[in-house]
Image (cartoon, rainbow, N blue to C red):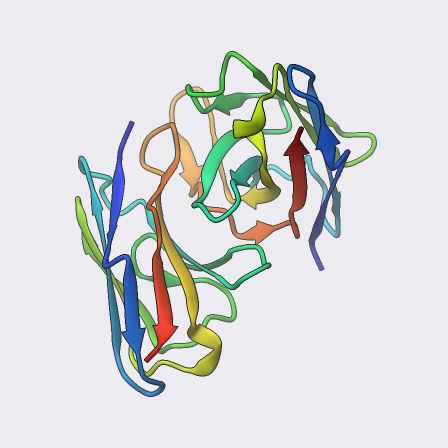
Amino acid sequence: QLQLLESGPGLVRPSETLSLTCTVSGDSITSSSFSWGWIRQPPGKGLEWIATMYYTETTNYNPSLKSRVTISVDTSKNQFSLNLKSVSAADTAVYYCGRQPGHCSSTTCFGYYAVDVWGQGTTVTVS
Amino acid sequence: EIVMTQSPGTLSVSPGERATLSCRASQSVSTNLAWYHQKPGQAPRLLIYFVSTRATGIPARFSGSGSETEFTLTISSLQSEDFGVYYCQQYNKWPLTFGGGTKVEIK
């Protein structure tokens, strides 16, 4: 059974870098059919997509965060990570990682980029 | 970016009644539209993708319809476990975007 688990510090100081890791169990992160993404949810608010990557490190970022965000993969550990630099109180949120059953070649895309499996989420407070 | 607008913001429904939720896109998303359900303190759960395809394990009382810019999620007979917030999401173009959500509460 596929499971995703976010980990990282729950408290980050303003102007520092938020670093989170998502550990995937029950499937390989190098599966050709899936991409892997990060989504966040500020307290009492809706969902915001942050970024998506394929294991070949093809990435897509939300333009509103692109200048501060980096996502990467460690295939040896079956993990992918999120780094968000220069954080402020506006970055306080529950951060989710998820599997997305889509991927794109240079010419076309396959599947779909909804999130079909979610991690439980991890709360990050910037203060 | 494509802006997703959901209505109503809150829907009060009695158990056993039908619930109809709407989602509008600021430009066409073709059929690249998903719906999620989120209960308090939990991660969202995928209900439907490609407008009307139910995800694994989702009961038949959930149905989706629409195309281009107008979409509907219908819950034919609301059960107690269906209360919570519902989100639509488009994946037709980057950046992926979500609607603001519809809260379904007990009437």
Instruction: Give percent across and percent down for residue A123.
Output: 66, 43
Q: Is residue A65 left or right of residue B77?
A: right
Q: Is residue A109 left or right of residue B7?
A: right
Work out whether residue B14 or residue A72 is closer to the camera in this orientation and state it.
B14
Q: Quadrant of the C terminus of chain A?
A: top right
Identified at 51% across, 44% down, the residue is A101
Q: In the figure, B77 relative to A15: above or below?
A: below
Quarter location, residue B74: bottom left
Q: Residue furthest right?
A: A76
Q: Is residue A45 visible?
A: yes
Quarter location, residue A108: top left
Q: In the figure, A98 relative to A19: above or below?
A: below
Identified at 60% across, 37% down, the residue is A32
Instruction: Give percent across and percent down for residue A37.
Output: 56, 36
Q: Is residue A53 visible?
A: no
Q: Quadrant of the N terminus of chain A?
A: bottom right
Identified at 28% across, 84% down, the residue is B17
Identified at 54% across, 62% down, the residue is B40
Q: Residue furthest top?
A: A67
Work out whether residue A83 or residue A115 is closer to the camera in this orientation and state it.
A83
Quarter location, residue B71: bottom left
Instruction: Give percent across and percent down for residue A81.
Output: 69, 28
